[in-house]
Amino acid sequence: MTGQPSATTGPDRLELGEGIRWTGDGVVLVDILEGRLLTTADGSDLPLREILRLPVPLGAVAPVADHPDTWIAAAGTGVCLLLPDGTPRWLATPEDRPGPSMRMNDGVADTFGRFWAGSMAYDGTEGAGTLYRVDHDGTVTPAIEGLTIPNGPAFTADGRTMYLADSAHGIVRRYPVDSDTGLVGTPEDFFTVDEGSPDGMTVDAEGAVWCAVWGTGTVRRYLPHGGLDRVVRVPAGQPAGVCLEGTLLHVTTARVGLDALGPYDGAVFTVPVDVSGAPTPAFRLAPSAPIAGALA
């Protein structure tokens, strides 16, 4: 973007900042490998505030509808509910199984209140990752298997289209999603990158996709037909997550894996833009779900 506004940032430097979301009440994000859930302060020059910390990696969260200060989380080797005091109530740990050592990665709730979260091998084993869907009854079901490093997903406002990156292969695919069942249809390639890796994504009010491109210091906006619309640059090499808080673009970055650290690697940036985004949807747990009693 020619003449783009300067990015502002606070003092924090995260190992692997991702999963940034605007909830409508505030902005939350994770430092994955440190297991930390954080929130931004009022003012980009202030430190982040830690909400809770887990003894396992924390990939992403979504708020739980009608349960204040409660989250559904992609964490460790599965999915859990995080109570207001930080106590986890596990729904399932499907990646606690023989094979390569696994962890959960990015995740988000869709318009219909389902939660989607991906898994990956620590060593990047080809095809070891899975995208899981969590339904209203708390059931955790494999939705897409054979992925390597799934990132996103991100959904259109109607919830019927999902964008999902397989970062190891430099590709973002677009999937139709059945609104009633959550079943995923046959994908089509949306865009690929020749340099770096597509990472966290969000969809704006015009249906365009903003994607952090790891290894390039850029966030890119792709129009619904797949054409590149603009490039926003930040002074850190590994952008990992994005969200829109109204017309403020927030970008998380990472220090992990870098031999030489720049002064802004791992920072969280804020850049004014001219298109808005909506708050992230909440996960909706059915009152009859077996786990619902843990939230009473």
Image: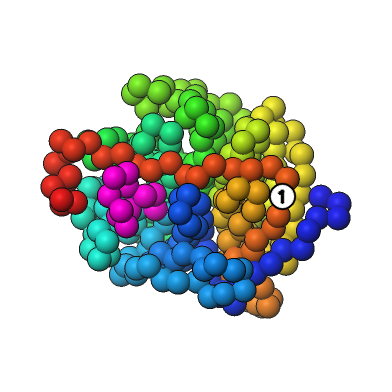
Task: Give coordinates of residue 59: x percent, y percent.
Answer: 42, 56
Q: Specify whether 67 is left or right of 3.
A: left
- The span picked out in magenta is 61-71
What residue do we see at 36% from left, 50% from top?
A: 63
- How many numbered marks have been drawn onto this rendered protein structure? 1
Q: Position of residue 165 (x, y in %)?
A: 55, 42
Q: Which of 68/82 is in front?
A: 68
| 209, above or below 50, in the image | above
For the point 59% across and 77% down, the residue is 11
**255 is higher (above) or lower (below) than 249:** below
Which residue is at 61% across, 57% downward?
250
Quarter of the rendering containing residue 77? bottom left
Q: Tell whether 199 sits left or right of 31.
A: right
Query: Is residue 237 something that shows in the picture?
Result: yes
- Up-down relation of residue 24 to residue 46 (above or below): above
**Residue in the foreground of this view, choosing between 24 and 254:** 24
Residue 51 in the image: state x and y as whole percent.
37, 67
- Magenta region, main secondary structure: loop
Assign a secondary structure to mark 1.
Answer: strand
Q: Seen in the image, is 104 located left or right of residue 277?
A: left
The residue tagged 1 is: 273
Task: Give me the residue at 30% from left, 70% from top.
Answer: 55
Lateral position of residue 62 relative to residue 124, left or right? left
